[in-house]
Amino acid sequence: MEEIKEETGTVNKGPEIVFTNVTKEYPNGVKALDNVSFRVAPGEFAFLMGHSGSGKSSLIKLLMLEERPTSGSITVGNVDLGSVKSSGIPYYRRLIGIVFQDFRIIFSMTVFENVAFALEMLGESRKEIEKQVMAALDLVGLAEKRNEKPDCLSGGEQQRVAIARAVVNLPGIIIADEPTGNLDKENSVEIMKILQKINMMGTTVIVATHEREIVAETGQRVIELNHGVRLLGDE
Amino acid sequence: MKFLRICFYVIRQSAKNIARNFFMIFASVVVVFFVLLVAGAFIETGLTLGNAIEQYSDRADVEINFKTYVTEETANEYLRYIAADSRVKEVKYISRDENIERIIEFFDEYRDIYEGYRDSELLGFISLEVQLKTYSDRESFVSEIEAEPDVDNVQNIVETIEKMELVRFWVNIATITASVVMTALSLLLIFNTVKLTVIARKKEIEIMKYIGATDVYIATPFVIEGVTTGLLGALIAFLSLWGIYNGVYSFLKDLLADSKIVPMTFAESGGGVILLFFLLFGAVTGFIASVFAAKKHMKV
């Protein structure tokens, strides 16, 4: 455990992510990723593009250490994910903020509590929690709605709560899995602007999406996957 | 400091869980209560029988009580006759005065009334306490003595003890069986209660896992919930049993004119050891059931 803490402790803001010949084959024989290699530079913004079944979700699961690759290696900063033991996974995940298509916020909690949740777990003081949560809510433009319950918010606002929760403990990487999938155009643009703002602060951002329009509007780097094989996205 | 804050946060979460699942927890508490009530009743009966056996064990194998008209001389003839019997190991002569003293001591609270009858022939009788060489001779010996015209009654203590030992044996078997079945029932119910809580909070657990919560951190509120359920059930069961047994004990004491009835463990000792046993049982059952439920259903 300590070993992992030490290892992950060396990963600072915006670490580099390197996939080297990564293959992921599930027990049912489905090959989700086939010999995929790419590099995301420290503090870079990259889109992970591809249709449904292209391997985006598997790639994210590998990055979150929900799954292990069948072969190949993944490094985040100077951490080889293959060397992270099960007991070290929670500590590794604290370096990553994750945003989902379906927001995954807790409806019984207020906006503030949803964001504070991540810091309470780390044993931060009330004062520190208040300060960091308000900074995160300011960043996503929801400071005014801190005491609202999520069901009083629009879809776009709920996704912004999820983003605030992802960034509140200042992770080095933000991974967003189809963050605009459940939103209209206007809200999607808003969410992308927030993610770009976070990236400007030095955080490495990876956004998995199948919406070409959004990708084209932002003009950021694209890593395209098709049936588990990388097609585009030179460094 | 951070660790303490995490502990407080986890305890707060546990309290919220308990408040949120009050009815489910109440059902589990009721089951634990019944489990311990039934098991506790058996245990207490076994212990009370043990006390009774201990009291009887100090006495002679057979007590022969003569009719009140029997004189010291006649009683001594019987003593010599019995002492010469090859089945007898030892005979002890209990005089009229000693017997009266025993009666007065037995009804200690009414000593004054009985003191007035110290010279009454109705209370004064001579006894012989007989220790036999082997228990197998007991029945033949007792029936022979009972046939004597001067003998009023014969107390066959060994037989009484044997009967009580047999009852205690079956009570112990029943205690073990009831404890095993009821423990399994408690485990199952607490397991299901915690399982339902975990399932209800699956989304929350999933989020916690993604933001880096450890399994111990996630599981602790559920374990606290399980242990609390077990402890509450144990405490209520103990208080109920304690009340029931004290009531029964007082009732018997009044009924038997405050004579020296067999002491009940609850009433005599205040039940400290039993309370400890109940609480330990509740805590361990709650802990095991909730750890398994949390572990099994926490994977996201």
Image (cartoon, coloured by chain):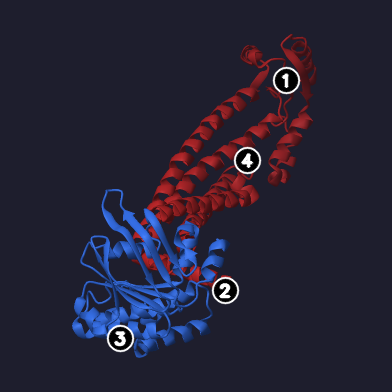
In x, y percent, where is residue B37? 48, 48
Q: Say which of marks 2 and 1 sits in front.
A: 2
**Horizontal side, residue A234 vs residue B37: left or right:** left
- Is the residue marked by circle 3 packed among few (<14), some (14-19), or many (20+) residues within 10 Å? some
Q: Quadrant of the C terminus of chain B?
A: bottom left
Tag 4 near tag 3, CB within 8 Å: no
Q: Residue at x 33, y 63 (%)?
A: A59
Q: Say which of marks 2 and 3 sits in front.
A: 3
Q: Chain of mark 3?
A: A
Identify the disc placed on residue B261.
Answer: 4
Chain coloured blue: A
Pointer 1 residue: B130
Q: Chain of mark 4?
A: B
Total numbered labels: 4
Q: CA distance from mark 2 to mark 1?
A: 75 Å
Q: Chain of mark 1?
A: B
Q: Chain of mark 2?
A: B
In x, y percent, where is residue B114? 71, 40
Pointer 2 residue: B2
